[in-house]
Image (cartoon, helix red, strand yellow):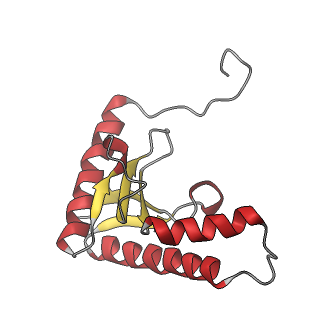
């Protein structure tokens, strides 16, 4: 427990983080080889405005490497603006449905490409990480 009384999830030790950093670099390289633009958003790169695969190391003890698809800003902004204005969840506007379809298709593509390249990859917990792929290892 922290000094404020909240349960803080334990962070991974430095050696585990180091292995994840190497895994994230290899995942970026594998995606790049497949023609997928990939970047390490956790290394200070401004990933919000860069379309492509955003690869980040999750520092928590049970974490791994997270890969999430970034669309161009105008696609994401259109969906967010509609959500902020309030929409009927039973009849979502096309812009939101299209954004969700792109995210789902690209998650599945990233998952398949990483698995084919030899990575242990799975869908991340949607409630915590949205449409991210979680990479936990590499099978040579």
Query: What residue is drawn where x is 49% and y is 38%?
Result: 61
Residue 93 drawn above or below residue 79: below
Residue 26 position in % (x across, y down): 22, 57
Residue 46 drawn above or below residue 27: above
Residue 129 drawn above or below residue 99: above
Query: What residue is drawn where x is 37% and y is 44%?
Result: 42
Q: Quadrant of the N terminus?
A: top right
Residue 130 position in % (x across, y down): 58, 62
Quarter of the figure with residue 21: top left
- View extreme (left): residue: 33
Q: Is residue 81 left or right of residue 87?
A: left
Query: What residue is drawn where x is 61% and y is 54%?
Result: 128
Q: Quadrant of the C terminus?
A: bottom left
Front residue of 58 and 95: 95
Q: How many marks?
A: 0
Residue 100 position in % (x across, y down): 58, 76
Q: Is residue 56 left or right of residue 37?
A: right
Quarter of the figure with residue 115: bottom left
Front residue of 90 and 72: 72
Q: Is residue 29 left or right of residue 62?
A: left
Residue 136 position in % (x across, y down): 39, 56
- View extreme (top): residue: 3
């Amino acid at each position: 427990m922290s000094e404020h009384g909240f349960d803080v999830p334990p962070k991974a030790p430095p050696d585990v983080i180091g292995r994840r950093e190497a895994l994230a670099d290899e995942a970026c390289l594998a995606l790049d080889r497949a023609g997928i633009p990939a970047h390490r958003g956790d290394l200070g790169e401004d990933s919000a405005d860069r379309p492509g695969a955003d690869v980040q190391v999750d520092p928590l003890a049970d974490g791994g490497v997270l890969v999430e698809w970034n669309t161009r800003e105008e696609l994401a902004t259109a969906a967010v603006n509609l959500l902020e204005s309030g929409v009927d969840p039973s009849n979502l506007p096309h812009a939101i449905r299209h954004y969700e379809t792109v995210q789902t298709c690209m998650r599945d593509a990233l998952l398949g490409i990483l698995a084919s390249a030899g990575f242990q990859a799975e869908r991340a917990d949607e409630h915590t990480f949205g449409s991210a792929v979680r990479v936990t290892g590499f099978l040579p």
